[in-house]
Image: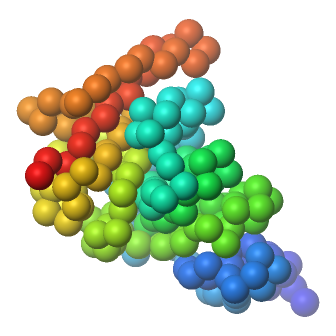
Amino acid sequence: MKAPAIALLAAALAAGGSRPAKTAAEPLLVAVQAPARAPDVPYEPTPPDVVREMLRLADVRPTDVVYDLGCGDGRIVIAAAKSYGARGVCVDIDPRRIIESRRNAMSAGVAPRITFRTEDLFQTDIADATVVMLFLWPEVNLRLRPKLLRELKPGTRIVSHWHDMGDWAPDKMVIVSPGGRARPVYLWTVPR
């Protein structure tokens, strides 16, 4: 087998597709391709201290369905599943990030609790979310805000690392300082 074919097979086995496997040992074969369009923001992982504060601020519980729009390596949803027993949905337009997220969730033993979607965050269905996590840019948050308010149920918590939602005042804001660099974390609750 040639090297590119081996790499594709390895990536497909690690990815496991866009639905949760019936068991953690049942990977699905998928074709790996470039994103349909460029991601809205470049990938930058959220520091572990910020992940912990985002989950604490959202008051994540085992009954929650935690979405991460632009999930990167899946660390926020994985932490929600592992530390709080929540279910989660990782959404990223870049299939490489979804492959990485699934692999990380499998390693953490929480893949059966997480759904993985290679989708555009502006197009994905978020109606069943009880918590939505964001680490996007200000203009992306503002473009996303109407979708969040339209599709999410009242009481759904939205947490954003670093960037606010313009004139929508947060319910709470805290500062986390990993490595001495102050990072704001915002919380909103979808109004009734």
Q: Is residue 167 above or below residue 36?
A: above
Q: Is residue 120 above or below residue 43?
A: below
State the quadrant of the N terminus: bottom right
**Residue occupying image coordinates x 12% and y 36%:** 168
* Name of the residue lying farthest toward the right: 1
**Residue occupying image coordinates x 77% and y 76%:** 24
The quadrant where residue 123 appears: bottom left
**Residue 137 seen from this side:** yes
The quadrant where residue 125 appears: bottom left
- Residue 65 in percent (x, y) is at 45, 61
Q: Nearer the viewer, residue 187 or 9?
A: 187
Q: Is residue 113 above or below residue 163?
A: below
Q: Is residue 164 above or below residue 21?
A: above
**Residue 143 seen from this side:** no
- Residue 14 in percent (x, y) is at 75, 73
- Residue 172 in percent (x, y) is at 28, 26
- Residue 118 in percent (x, y) is at 48, 73
Q: Nearer the viewer, residue 57 or 91?
A: 57
Q: Nearer the viewer, residue 44 or 63?
A: 63
Q: Is residue 20 left or right of residue 59?
A: right
**Residue occupying image coordinates x 14% and y 48%:** 191
* Count of numbered tags: 0
The colouring scheme, among rainbow, by chain, secondary structure or one colour, is: rainbow
**Residue occupying image coordinates x 57% and y 33%:** 52
